[in-house]
Image (spheres, rainbow, N blue to C red):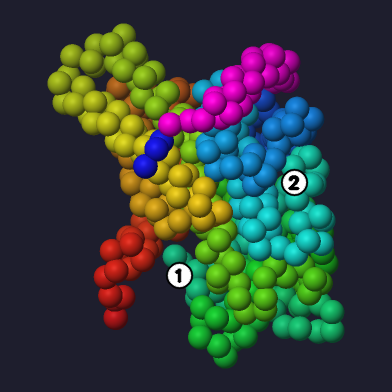
Amino acid sequence: MDLSYTPEEDEFRARLREWLAKALPGLPPKPRPEDWPGRRAYDLGWQRALYDAGYADVHWGASPTVRLIFLEETEKAGAPYVGANFVGLLHAGPTIAAEGTEEQRARWLAPILRGDEVWCQGFSEPGAGSDLAALRTRAWRDGDDYVVSGSKIWTSHAEVADWCELLVRTDPGAPRHRGISWLAMPMTAPGVTVRPLRTLAGSAEFAEVFLDEVRVPASHRVGAENDGWRVTMVTLSFERGTAFVGEVVACRRVLVDLARAARANGTWDDPELRHRLGRLNAEFRALWRLTQWNVSEAEGRGVPGVGGSVFKLRYSHVRQELYDAAAAVLGPDALDLDRPWVLDRLSSLSYTIAAGTSQIQRNIVAERILGLPKGR
C-alpha cells in the first residue's frame, strides 16, 4: 500500500499552511469553557473563515487523504478545533452527504459548511447503556410527520444546537436492529426540553434531551423507514474512522511537551517514566500509520471501514495512558485544575465510553474483522 502523497496533495498542504499562518494571528480570544454561547459564536466564526477561504468542504467534499492533511495541518498550527461544529461536520454532514436525498443535501450541508447551523447527536439513551440498538424513543407516523416521544442522554452540544441527528424506533415489533430510523429534528420544535449535564471536568457540552410528542416532518428522515441502523453505521464509521485524526496529532505534540517538562523538573531521571514515554511515542506513531491505512481504504469505499474500530479501541486507551504519564510528570501539581494537562486527563476517562465503548469495539473487531462467532 502506497502511503505517500501526490504532488497535488503536497501543493494543498503548502497552500493551507500559508493561509493558516495569515489567518490565525487575527483570531479573537477563545471564550472560557463554560461560555457555550460564546464558544458557539467563536466556532461558527472560524468555520465561516474556512468557508470563505475555500476549505470548508474538506469533511465530505474532498478525498479522505486531503481531509487527513487538513486535520493534520490545522492541529499542528494550533487552529481552533471544530468545537460546537463537531457533530455537523464530522457526523451528520458526512452521513447526509452519503445517504441523503438531493433536497436534503441542499438544505443541510451548506449551512453546516458556512457555519450557520450547529447539530447535536441524539443516539444514547438512559436505559440502553452501550447497546445502541436497545433504544426505546418512539416515533409513529401521523400524516406527513413523525410524532416522537422519549429521551436521550449524553447529547453532544444540545444546549447550542439547531438540529439533532436523532435515532428513533419506528417499528417496535421488528427485530431491534431493523425497526430504527434516522431523523433530522429541529431543536426549536415544540416538546423538546434540554437539560445540560456537567462533566467531571466541569464543562457542560452534553445534555439530557426530553421529547414529548415532538413533530418531525417525514421528509427529514435520512434513508428508508426502519433502515436507520444501516445509516447509523455510516455515521459511526465517520465518528470512529476520521473524527479523531486531529486529536492524534495533538497527543503527539503533548508527548513532546511532556518530555520537555520531565527534563526540566527532573522526572526524566526516572527510567520507568522514560520507558513509558518511549512506548507512547511508538503507540502514537503506529496509530498515525493506522489512520493513513484507514484513509487509503476509505479512498476506495467512500466511507471509513471497520478498521476505524481498531483505531478507536486502541486510541481510547493510549490517550488515557498519555495523561496518566502527564500526572507522573506533574507530581502533586496533577491535582491542580489550572495546570496544563489536568483537565485533559479528566476528559480522557470518557474516551473508552464515548463513540462506542471499548467492549463494543472489541465485539466489532472480533465479529466483522476476525470473523469470530457472535456471543450468546
User: Which residue is located at x 40 percent, y 44 percent?
Assistant: 293
In this orientation, does residue 45 appear? no
Q: Is residue 174 above or below residue 299?
A: below
Q: Which residues are magenta?
A: 4-29
User: In terms of sequence position, does the residue under pointer 2 or pointer 1 come before the other?
Assistant: 2
Q: Which residue is mark 1?
A: 131
* Label 2 element class: helix
In this orientation, does residue 214 appear? yes
**For the C terminus, which image quadrant?**
bottom left
Q: Which mark is residue 239?
A: none
Q: Which residue is mark 2?
A: 112
Q: Amino acid at mark 1?
A: Asp
Q: Amino acid at mark 2?
A: Ile
| Membership of 23 in magenta stretch | yes
Q: CA distance from mark 2 to mark 1?
A: 29 Å
| Residue 103 % position (x, y) | 82, 62
| Residue 360 % position (x, y) | 38, 63
Q: In front here: 242 or 329?
A: 242
